[in-house]
Amino acid sequence: MPATRIGPIEGVGVLGAGTAFPPRTYANEDALRLLPDAAARGPARLAFAAKGLTQSIGVAERAWAHPPGAPLAHGDEPTTLDLALQAGRAALADAGLDAADLGLVLVATSTPHRMTSTLAVPLGAALGAQAACMDTRTGCSAGLFALGTAALFVAAGSGPALIVGTETFSKVVPPDHPMGLLSLGDGAGALVLGRKPGSALEGLFLRSDGNLGALIGTSGPLPPTPDAIEAGGYQLSGQPEALAAALPERYLEALGAALDTAGRAPTDLAAYVPHQTSVPLIREVAASAGIPADRVWTEGVGRHANIGAAGWLVAFAEARAAGRFGDGDPVATASVGGGMSWAAAVLRC
């Protein structure tokens, strides 16, 4: 199957970054107490399971806009738009730009706040942007599809671009599924991309295969029907074991292709900052790719769990703020998303 490679796109770099999260954080035991059979499991078993998750994949806590399984309280809980607005404002402030300076607003999400239209357009309005606004929908890798789109627009003279990944998985996670509860979080990450001498999107790889779409997703048709709602068709489902088996190969394909396009060796990288889903998976991929262990960012897994399309954007913003890389440094990122799509990029920041 053909794949897409682009780069290098010279003179385009990251001008600012920001993040946002719901106000309430849930530790693993807090999440497990939401299970329908939590009382029957007992405190000891819940504590054991919570500790086991931290040991197995590295997740310790996550922020949620909504307690999974509780009745939805629209109007009283943060939405994907609310989180996107907070992260977008933070990224613009970090870049020292106003929304009126933007030439493009791109939003990546799997959990939009409305069934129709886009999330990017109301975000642009809330920010005060007059730019073109559009969404990208390719699961957890959507932010990388947005990165490539934004870089091409900026290079063509559009002006700075705002990329936002935002998710509220807590509103669609199955409340009776322990791994779903434990592995998913809510949040938003944003980057401002613009003209920046010495910077570049050195290499980008994008690939999709709809034949793998059943590995994770929601089966319910739109518009929703009572029968599909009753059957749980609008909550995440899939084949978790098959998905886990498919991930390393996709990460390595994307990462290897992005490095090749960039003309970089793995040891050239100042940092590898991928989608934050599992510490062992991140380390396995990095080791197989030949990236030194001390250059691999995994800190987001424990604090945030998997926040979908926001995952690598939040990780990039936090690693940048922590000083793990700076201007002129080559940084790689990668993500695999439901649908299924996978992508990787090498940026010279």
Image (spheres, grey):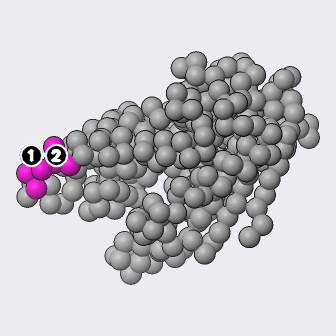
Quadrant showing the N terminus: bottom right
User: Horizontal and vertical percent for residue 189?
Assistant: 57, 36
Q: Residue at x 77, y 46 (%)?
A: 260
- Quarter residue 12 falls in: top right
121 inside magenta stretch: no
Q: Is residue 110 visible?
A: no
The segment highlighted magenta reads 41-49
Please tell me which residue lies in front, 122 or 162.
162
**Which residue is identified by label 1?**
44
- Quarter residue 35 falls in: bottom left
Mark 2 and mark 1 in contact (Cβ < 8 Å)?
Answer: yes
Q: Secondary structure at mark 1?
A: helix
Q: Residue at x 91, y 41 (%)?
A: 156
User: Horizontal and vertical percent for residue 339?
Assistant: 58, 65
Question: Could you tell me how many numbered marks the image carries?
Answer: 2
Q: Residue at x 65, y 55 (%)?
A: 253
User: Horizontal and vertical percent for residue 50?
Assistant: 23, 44
Question: Which residue sits furthest right?
Answer: 156
**Which residue is identified by label 2?**
48
Q: Secondary structure at mark 2?
A: helix
